[in-house]
Image: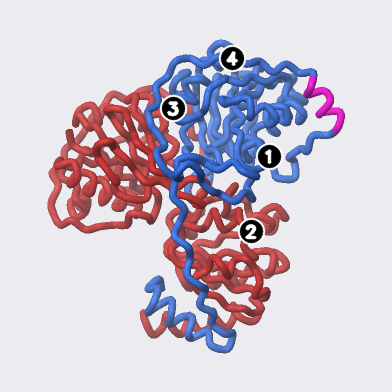
């Protein structure tokens, strides 16, 4: 089985979010980049398929050279080879089109992407990629098992989950649950050394037009001070929630 | 070129999000000087939608349950029939599942998590959340056909008294190799996605055996229960209750955080909630900076009292 894991290069979850150039660009100053957490759960599940079912695992990112350390980290965790499509990722649809070319050329059986990136939160690349490559698709995937051509998976729905059967080729939008937090791997020294020798192929992009354009960012209005209620006056809290906030 | 809106239902009844997306579609229709067509599945009487600005209803009878590929293809056919240039969907798990497939089918640009009516119709520009609610992003959709995914509980439900005509719509049904074997859904509990109020517990509650009071408080308020990441990582509560940046987003009217200090990732995930209350022993906990109302105190003393007082309040205001 050939697996491709899509890796988005995103600011660490603790990053302070600021903007530059008249609020048109994300301010990368002092920001640490990581593998998108939703992708990392998928990458870890892919390692299970590699170790137990002899799958090969490639990782791919659509982005500039600055994303290579993130791809190297995925190699250090255990992926076999990395691909970088050399273009700036501006729009989810355009990214999906770049990835579709990689998927078709590489004849992958399974594509694992995160349900969304934690920066733009578009939540569209996995589904678009499935649509473009005519693969089966499961979003919000929280468990995945494959036996030959038979796939058993579950999807988180609002208020519960669904158990699904399908076949390959398959694209999933993965998230926590595919593996547990405690299963995530920190690259060890041997992995980091081996990652340096693993292939990282740079592909030139296919022509696409941007279906959407980000024009500007805005930070939420600063919050007013908290109103404190003392523990012996909880009637006041109920009154505030009822009369002032009107939420109960 | 009517605006097409996908109005979701469950067992023949519209979800709250359906009325919200209908209201949103009406606002866009007013801006564009056009009408609203809703597509519904298995709703015997959809006339309620007329109260939220819908002019025409296409009702599809499809008894085999939700399938993203099949539904995306049906909505595509409806968009073609109505020559719709704009399709509006919600942020439910199902809408977010089908919208990217629909985008490929219609070759449409798609913007998700949209919180306001378009700030401009030419170029078509929407305001959406990004960086998990730490910022807003203005996005132009450049394609002739556009898909707008509306955030939960952001635009709100707006009544627009009117009436809608209704017709049956019989599209071609495509095949899908994805089949649902079983659905496991707690019917007696409010889901985090649909809840007006969410009561959430953190590590300050010291152990899973102490969740009785969280559940009781939630029950009195008709609320969903949730938890912080450490609590789900420790296995005290199911992962499906984890709210935050890598868990579920929350956009309720009221969010009550008990024994949660307020890590940046947690605050990001719940920031779209309108009113936040924090109960924590540590007055320096970061949550107090993000909250509207706070009680500095021990949850084990405050919550039982709050439960009693809310029971009295509910009895008086029933």
Instruction: Report in which chain the residue with disc 1 lies.
Output: A
Which residue is labeled 2 in the image?
Answer: B263
The quadrant in which the N terminus of chain B is found is top left
Residue B151 within the segment the image draws in magenta: no
Which residue is labeled 3 in the image?
Answer: A93
Instruction: Report in which chain the residue with disc 3 lies.
Output: A
Which residue is labeled 1 in the image?
Answer: A179
Per the picture, the main secondary structure of the magenta-coloured stretch is: helix
**What color does chain B have in the rendering?**
red
Judge from the rendering whether residue B109 lies leftward or rightward of residue B244; answer left or right: left
Quarter-wise, where is residue B253 in the image?
bottom left
Q: Which mark is residue A203?
A: 4
Camera-side mark, 4 or 3: 4
Of residues B305 and A218, the one nearer the viewer is: A218
Q: Which of marks 3 and 1 is nearer the N terminus?
A: 3
Task: Pinpoint residue A56: horizontal percent, then vertical percent.
Answer: 70, 18
Kindly tell me whether residue A60 is visible in this rendering.
yes
Find the magenta span and give its range. A189-196
Q: Earlier in the sequence, mark 4 or mark 3?
A: 3
The quadrant in which the C terminus of chain B is found is bottom left
Task: Pinpoint residue A96: horizontal percent, then vertical percent.
Answer: 48, 25
Residue at the far bottom in the pictured view: A232
Chain drawn blue in the picture: A
Q: Which residue is drawn at 74% across and 19% down?
A: A54
Q: Residue at x 60, y 69 (%)?
A: B258
| Up-down relation of residue A3 to residue B192 (above or below) | above
């Amino acid at each position: 089985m050939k697996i491709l894991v899509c890796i988005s290069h995103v600011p660490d979850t603790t990053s302070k979010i600021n903007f530059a150039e008249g609020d048109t660009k994300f301010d990368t100053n002092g920001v640490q980049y990581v593998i998108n957490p939703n992708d990392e759960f998928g990458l870890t599940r892919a390692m299970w398929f590699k170790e137990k079912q002899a799958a090969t695992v490639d990782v791919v990112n659509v982005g500039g050279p600055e994303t290579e350390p993130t791809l190297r980290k995925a190699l250090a965790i255990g992926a076999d080879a990395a691909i970088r499509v050399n273009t700036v990722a501006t729009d989810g649809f355009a990214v999906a089109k770049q990835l579709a070319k990689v998927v078709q050329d590489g004849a992958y059986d399974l594509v694992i992407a995160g349900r969304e990136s934690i920066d733009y939160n578009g939540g569209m690349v996995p589904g678009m990629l499935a649509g473009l490559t005519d693969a089966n698709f499961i979003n919000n995937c929280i468990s995945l098992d494959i036996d030959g051509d038979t796939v058993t998976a579950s999807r988180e729905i609002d208020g519960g989950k669904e158990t699904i059967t399908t076949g390959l080729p398959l694209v999933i939008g993965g998230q926590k649950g595919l593996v547990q937090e405690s299963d995530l791997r920190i690259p060890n020294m041997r992995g980091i050394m081996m990652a340096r020798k693993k292939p990282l192929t740079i592909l030139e992009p296919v022509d696409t037009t941007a279906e959407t354009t980000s024009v500007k960012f805005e930070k939420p209005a600063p919050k007013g001070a908290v109103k404190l209620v003392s523990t012996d006056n909880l009637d006041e809290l109920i009154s505030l929630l009822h009369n002032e906030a009107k939420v109960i | 070129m009517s605006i097409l809106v996908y109005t979701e239902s469950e067992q023949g009844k519209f979800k709250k999000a359906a009325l919200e997306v209908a209201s949103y579609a009406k606002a866009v229709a007013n801006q564009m000087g056009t009408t609203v067509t809703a597509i519904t599945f298995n709703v015997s009487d959809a006339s309620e939608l007329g109260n939220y600005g819908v002019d025409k209803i296409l009702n599809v009878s499809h008894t085999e349950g939700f399938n993203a590929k099949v539904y995306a293809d049906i909505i595509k056919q409806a968009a073609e029939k109505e020559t719709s240039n704009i399709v509006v969907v919600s942020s439910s798990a199902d809408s977010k599942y089908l919208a990217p497939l629909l985008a490929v089918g219609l070759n449409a640009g798609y913007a998700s998590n949209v919180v306001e009516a378009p700030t401009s119709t030419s170029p078509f520009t929407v305001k959406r959340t990004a960086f998990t609610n730490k910022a807003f992003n203005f996005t132009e959709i450049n394609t002739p056909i556009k898909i707008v995914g509306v955030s939960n509980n952001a635009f709100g439900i707006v009544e627009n008294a009117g009436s809608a005509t209704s017709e049956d719509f019989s599209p071609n049904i495509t095949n899908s190799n994805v089949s649902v074997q079983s659905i496991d859904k707690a019917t007696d509990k409010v889901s985090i996605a649909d809840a007006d109020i969410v009561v959430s517990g953190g590590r300050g509650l010291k152990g899973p055996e102490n969740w009785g009071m969280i559940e009781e408080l939630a029950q009195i308020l008709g609320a969903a229960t949730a938890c912080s990441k450490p609590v789900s990582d420790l296995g005290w509560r199911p992962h499906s209750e984890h709210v935050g940046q890598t868990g579920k987003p929350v956009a309720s009217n009221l969010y009550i955080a008990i024994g949660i200090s307020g890590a940046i990732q947690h605050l990001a995930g719940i920031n779209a909630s309108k009113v936040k209350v924090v109960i924590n022993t540590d007055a320096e906990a970061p949550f107090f900076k993000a909250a509207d109302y706070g009680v500095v105190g021990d949850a084990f003393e405050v919550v039982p009292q709050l439960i009693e007082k809310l029971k009295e309040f509910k009895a008086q205001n029933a």
